[in-house]
Image (cartoon, coloured by chain):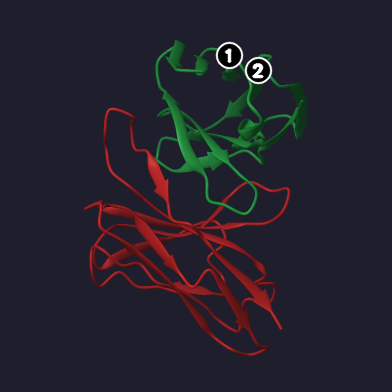
Chain colours: A red, B green
């Protein structure tokens, strides 16, 4: 059963702590993305990767880091430099189909600061 | 700059029809996407338009006018489960999605 998984569903961060959000896909998609969603706002792109061992900053990359060592995995680290990390984090992957470069999303991780 | 506009909230009655509008301004254009997002969940893909005209998928249809920078999502025979936010997103020349803030659709019995 193909899909995108994210873990954990909820994550709590203490002040000064780095936390890592997991994203795995078995859809054989080349491109993967991380978005942040805040109430009343559109999705904002944090980082994206179009191929293994390569990634680019999105609109709000400050305070975040990523790696893409495997095609299936694109973990996101929220560092202590991100001063307002409370948000819903969404991972997506895409491939070119008859529906263009459609992005498909994982279930999301909700990050809360203690 | 790049921008997507859609209404913040709409209300409709069960069994009725509702049209959610979206206008966009992007640097280049590679298609217009609609997603549905239930509260607390991830967005799910509904439709993709890259050519002018209407695309129909069951109770949902999506329209695009490239010359006007305009799209709409039409939902027919509304059901209570259609209560959700509907996100409009346009793909720019770099194949990046520019997202609207979403339209919260409230369905009343």
Residue A6, horizontal then vertical, whole percent: 43, 65
**Chain of the residue under label 1:** B
On the same chain, marks 2 and 1? The answer is yes
Q: Please tell me which residue is depicted at 62% across the width and 80% down the height of the picture.
A: A12
Report whether B47 appears left or right of A74: right
**Chain of the residue under label 2:** B
Crowd rating for badge 2 (residues with CA inside 10 Å; few <14, some 14–19, many 20+): some
Which residue is identified by label 2?
A: B19
Helix, strand or loop at mark 1: loop
Of mark 2 and mark 1, the one earlier in the sequence is 2
Tell how many labels: 2
Q: Are marks 2 and 1 in contact (CB under 8 Å)?
A: no
The disc label shown at residue B1, or none? none
Residue B42, horizontal then vertical, whole percent: 53, 50
**Above or below B40: residue A74:** below
Helix, strand or loop at mark 2: strand
Q: In this orientation, which residue lies closer to the viewer: A98 or A56? A: A98
Q: In this orientation, which residue lies closer to the viewer: B60 or A16? A: B60
Q: Please tell me which residue is depicted at 35% across the width and 73% down the height of the picture.
A: A67
Crowd rating for badge 1 (residues with CA inside 10 Å; few <14, some 14–19, many 20+): few
Report whether B91 appears left or right of A14: left
Q: Please tell me which residue is depicted at 69% across the width and 79% down the height of the picture.
A: A113
Which residue is identified by label 1?
A: B68
């Amino acid at each position: 059963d193909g899909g995108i998984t994210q873990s954990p569903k909820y994550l709590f961060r203490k002040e000064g702590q780095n936390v890592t959000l997991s994203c795995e896909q078995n859809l054989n998609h080349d491109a993967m993305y991380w978005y942040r969603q805040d109430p009343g706002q559109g999705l904002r792109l944090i980082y994206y990767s179009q191929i293994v061992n390569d990634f680019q900053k999105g609109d709000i990359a400050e305070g975040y880091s990523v790696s893409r060592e495997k095609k299936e995995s694109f973990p996101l680290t929220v560092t202590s430099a991100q001063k307002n990390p409370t948000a819903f984090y969404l991972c997506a992957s895409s491939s070119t189909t008859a529906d263009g470069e459609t992005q498909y999303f994982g279930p999301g991780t909700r990050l809360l600061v203690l | 700059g790049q921008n997507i506009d859609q209404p913040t909230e709409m209300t409709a009655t069960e069994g009725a029809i509702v049209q959610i509008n979206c206008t966009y301004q992007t640097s280049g254009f590679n298609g217009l996407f609609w997603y549905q997002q239930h509260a607390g969940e991830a967005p799910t893909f509904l439709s993709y338009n890259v050519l002018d005209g209407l695309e129909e998928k069951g109770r949902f249809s999506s329209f695009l006018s490239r010359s006007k920078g305009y799209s709409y999502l039409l939902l027919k025979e509304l059901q209570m489960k259609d209560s959700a936010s509907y996100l409009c997103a346009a793909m720019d020349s770099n194949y990046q999605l520019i997202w609207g803030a979403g339209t919260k659709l409230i369905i009343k019995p």
